Image (tube, rainbow, N blue to C red):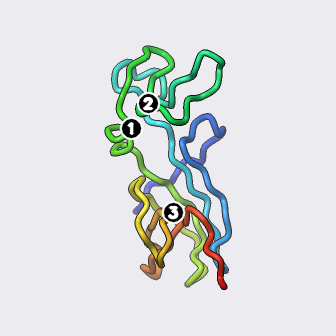
Amino acid sequence: MVDILQEPESMDECLYFSNRNIDTGKAMAWVYRPECPSCKKGRLGKPVKKNGKVDKKAEHFECPECKHQMSNEESENLLRVEVKYTCPFCGKPGEATTEYKRKVWKGVPAYVFECSSCHENIGITKKLKDPK
């Protein structure tokens, strides 16, 4: 049995969040910021610049509590995409987790997970593809 996923209470807890319709189904997906392996108190995130804004282009994550740094690649291996969904194929609700790595799915980069009922692959795309 799959663990019951805990929905985030705030966007501050997440590195990624998406809530969208997928054909006849829908999906809400999120990735929690990882806990600091050094102090276990803070959550890793992009460092804050002197002007108070987050440095989105930084090549490392930083703990706001102890200033411990971890490379993007190293910390992204710890991350999991958690998804609550209604399957567009069978219509049943479900929960899933998948790795925080986009795969090419139907020609579009997407976080891909499998429906627990009908075992069809479902993708949360980076950019919605034009149906033209």
Element type at marker 2? strand
Q: Is residue 49 left or right of residue 80?
A: right
Measured in 3D between alpha carbons, the distance from the residue under mark 1 to the one under mark 2, in whole angstroms, is: 6 Å
- Which numbered marker is on residue 13? none
Dot label at residue 61: 2
Mark before the other along the chain sequence, 1 or 3 = 1
Separation (CA) of disc 3 from disc 2: 28 Å
Say which element carries label 3: strand
The residue drawn where x is 44% and y is 54% is 3
Q: Any mark on residue 95, and which?
A: 3
| Nearer to me, 33 or 90 | 33
Residue 47 on image: x %, y %: 51, 25
- Tell which circle, 1 or 2, labels the residue nearer the N-terminal end: 2
Q: Quadrant of the C terminus?
A: bottom right
Q: Residue 14: x percent and y percent?
A: 56, 41
Comparing labels 1 and 3, the label whose residue is closer to the camera: 1
Q: Amino acid at mark 3?
A: Glu
Report the Cα–Cα distance between label 1 and label 3: 27 Å
Give percent across and percent down for residue 74.
32, 38
Determine contact: label 1, label 2, CB under 8 Å: yes
As drawn, the label of residue 72 is 1
Nearer-the-camera pick, 120 or 117: 120
* Side of 85 where 66 appears, left or right: left
Q: Residue at x 59, y 79 (%)?
A: 88
For label 3, count other residues whose C-alpha is less than 10 Å away and answer few (under 14), some (14-19) or many (20+). Answer: many
* Residue located at (42% from left, 53% from top): 100
Q: Earlier in the sequence, mark 3 or mark 2?
A: 2
Q: Amino acid at mark 1?
A: Asn
- Looking at the rendered structure, the kind of residue marked 2 is Phe
